[in-house]
Image: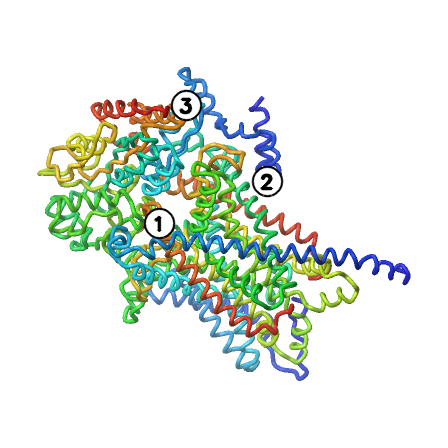
Amino acid sequence: MTAVSVPPKPVRRRRRLPAYAPWAVLAGALGVGALLSLLSGTFTFTGALLFGALVHVVAITTLSAVVEGRRWATDRLATTLVTAAFVLAAIPLVSLVVLVLRFGMERFSWTFLNDDMVGIFGASVEGGVFHAIIGTLWVTGLCSLVAIPLGILTAVYLVEYARPGPLKRAITVLVDVMTGIPSIVAGLFAATLFMVVVGPQYKAGVMGAVALALLMTPVVVRSVEEMLRLVPNELREAAYALGVPKWLTVVKVVLRTAIAGITTGVMIAIARVIGETAPLLLTVGIVANVNWNAFDGRIATLPVYVFRQYAQGGASVDRAWAGALTLILIVMLLNLVARLVSRYFSPKGAR
Amino acid sequence: MKRATWRPTRVAGLALLGAVALTVAACGPGGVDGDSGNDDTAATGGGADETSELSGAIAGSGASSQENAQLGWVAGFTEANPGVTVSYDPTGSSTGREQFLNGAVQFAGTDSPLKPEELEAAQERCGDGEALELPLYISPIAVVYNLPEVDAEHVNLTPEALAGIFAGEITRWDDPAITEANEGVELPDLAITPVNRSDGSGTTENFTEYLAAVAPDVWTHEPSDTWPIEGTVSGAQTQGMIDTVSSQEGAIGYADASRAGDLGTAAIGVGEEFVPYSAEAAAAVVDASPPTEDASDLRLTIELARDTTESGTYPIVLISYLVACSTYESEADAANVAAYLSYVASEEGQERAAQPDVAGSAPISDTLREQVDAAIEQITAAG
Amino acid sequence: MAAVAGSETIRRGRAPGRVGNAIFRGVSSSAGITIVVLLGLVAAFLVYRAVPALLATREELADVGFMRGQSLLGYVAPLAFGTVLSSVIALVVAVPLSIGIALFISHYAPRRLAQGLGYLVDLLAAIPSVIFGLWGLQFLQPLVGPLFQWLSDHMGWFPPFSGYVGPAKNIMTAGLVLAVMILPIITATIREVFLQTPRLHEEASLALGATRWEMIRQAVLPFGRSGIISAAMLGMGRALGETMAVLMVLAPGFAMNLYVLRPGQHQSIAANIANQFPEAGALGADVLIATGLFLFLLTFAVNLAARWVINRRAEFSGAN
């Protein structure tokens, strides 16, 4: 994309601002901002930045309008706003990471990762998340096993096979509705389902997986659907023209072209469910020991662990933050693996 | 051998779910039965010589107020009975009772006694037995406030002032209704922000019950587990309450006393004196309270004397019950539940929960313990 | 490859192609049907559990403590209002920002930086909601408190800003937390769409002498419009159904007004279910599930509206 981002020289020579102009204006604006913040009462860093940004937007646009003309001024304004949006959004997101790191590192250690909560109570600062990691991997893994293929196949059906008609419309609408299932209702559904089928005493990781799959599938469908639609028809037609059967076209051309987007969509879907708390508390409960079997017995999961540790207060709050950090690290790791996989499969030389 | 294979498995488990699946295939369900994995506990607890031969798993569910105490009890019980896995899901009292009644769990924790229709359902659930209701978690509810400038150990609040604050009639800390009870303490000219629990909670129910009993003129609302006034600042669960009060100077709230942390706690007017919360003062009010009308040998429900004027009692108390069956279908369940409840009722169990950093509860009196033990003895297996 | 070999391949390729086609078509359509069945089950479950609440008399409902004597409709209406209000605040904040970030990553940032940024955004899309709740309490609430106080003091003549009471546990804070939460989701989707803009369109626009912004307006935004709406809906879906973060940040209430800075005025359906469920009791649980049914319908309506908008713009889609 960046290859095209250098505008070609206009035919008639126009006066343009030098490349350093925006930076110079920014520096000046920040200075003025600091001054304004000082004048408005007490000097705060946030205030200086806020005022500075406002001054910069006004100054660069005016300057450009005078020197370069209206069209370029609009362009400058857009550039400034787009960059500002990015910087603005970075504040909460960066603070989030910093916060979790700061509080999480208090308790986070190799021992923390390798320990469970058997025998931990009161002000004890020991204990760890190993049992919850296993539980989260089990529950999310089982759930993904169902939701990802189901979601991708449904999206393929919607985009490649379905003709406009009642079934297509029904699926589209129902997937939309599914995104609106409150997570706790999904949990109740799974709990009731297993109570009817297996009996009231049964509690197991697989119940949580069912609840989460219900939440995850529509997210997969929607994002994959969007990505498949973006694959240009020319590619499909080229494949058909070469005599490639439709299903191979879908697998080898459409899905592979869209793989980066699909990966992003699937990761968003996993992230959507890996942090779910309410349905898991109802279905899989919480225990202190490691349970290796997702088909029998209560199992601890990271989000429930984080929420309960936080709710217990006192020394447990540190464990909650460390658990949150662990959860983020797991998601990061999964993300990294997914990226590598998608890079391996994606068509070479595309972008 | 077990320990030798343990560590490498764990590392692998961290990395890949596939590895987990393999390990499960290798270990089978044996892994479930709680090899503690915690080296310290395994070393000290496992070696205890009074190891019983009980085995199996029992599950409980219910009031989150008991969570911290239950964690302590489970840890202590498992040390003595390594063969039994006890779990407790803090799902809330109502859900706990429901799960108990439909057989999902063997015992429940609840902040309010079973209702009449639930007692009927309990008979069915317990195979013609009865439900036991044992008041094993008695905890003072502290009135917490955030006034960093005030250096008094406790701010004194009369019941009327307390009700006035939470009813929204007293809105400033230097209101005469408050300052009169606090001679020599400089109270700031600051708005009071009353904070309540946003979720349904036994703590709220007990607190509003207290307000309705002691200051019916000021507090005109019915006791309820949901806060009756709208448009208030509130927090979800105890931690949410504590966080909310901590984040606003001048805020006041109510919470399980063990969770007060750095916040100030009020001394409450009882009769002529002002009593700060303490385990002893909470135990004193329970001892001064009669059983409810429908209490029995098995159901030791207590009618708290909220309006007591007896010296040295702290009347804002939460009693949380442990509910179990008098008859279980399986012998193992009966034995395990009986053993667990006896441990909870024992001096050791009550002392453990009473430690300030565990749950800060008030240990039950010896008289009550005798009654509880007699009730627990009634637990049998069917047939 | 030789022509003879080629024709052979075609002949051999046809039969498996047909079988493969049939199988693949069968598998993918049965996946679609599975979803229909699955949702049918959930809907049946919801309706089944909601019926007792829908049929309950006023006296019966009066026993449900948290309803405070309201009728079912009177209970649901403010909840639905609060849900929509918080999601609208979140969308109004998040969508323009997301478009900006996505443009920055796809068309403004240098290529190397863009890849890193894309990865960062993906990561943030992956942060679980419990953590957003903790963040809202620890970071955002103290940060916006003074700001809200200032707004309330100086702009209090504008009714929605009046009557701020600290701490900042109001619908505005909840909306902001939701906005930050859905920001990465929306951005990640929009970015993928922007990156798919046909390069020919962009180059044609630039060749005609357009500035970068004009090119974006002529080529990128029209192409991405359905994607933007779709992404916004994805974010809205999450905002509507978000439980934990709202639960931790918002002091709930059951009013229908626009006092966005006052505590105890609004509540969202999902957070309310999670908040009240533990102590709900049998009929109470049914009432809560009935509110869940309403959330279902609400999401349905919102999505239907979005679909309608997208379909009017279907000509920009690559497939069909």
Kind of residue at badge 3 = Glu
What is the residue that sits farthest to the top in this orientation? B49
**Residue at 50% across, 78% down:** A62
In the depicted view, which residue is nearer to us: B14 or A108?
A: B14
Subunit bearing disc 2: B
C210 displayed left or right of A219? right
* Residue C109 at x, y percent in the picture: 60, 64
The amino acid marked with disc number 2 is Leu
Q: Position of residue C126 (x, y in %)?
A: 53, 52
Q: Is residue C141 above or below residue B36?
A: below
Q: Residue at x 44, y 32 (%)?
A: A126
Discs 1, 2 touching: Cβ within 8 Å? no
Residue A69 coordinates in the image, percent (x, y): 56, 82
- Image position of A63 (left or right of C318): left
Whole-angstrom CA distance, mark 1 to mark 2, is 36 Å
Q: Residue furthest left?
A: B272
Q: Circle 2 sits on which residue?
A: B17
Along the line of sight, the residue nearer the viewer: C98 or C276? C276
**Which residue is labeled 1 in the image?**
C285
State the residue at coordinates (11%, 50%).
Answer: B217
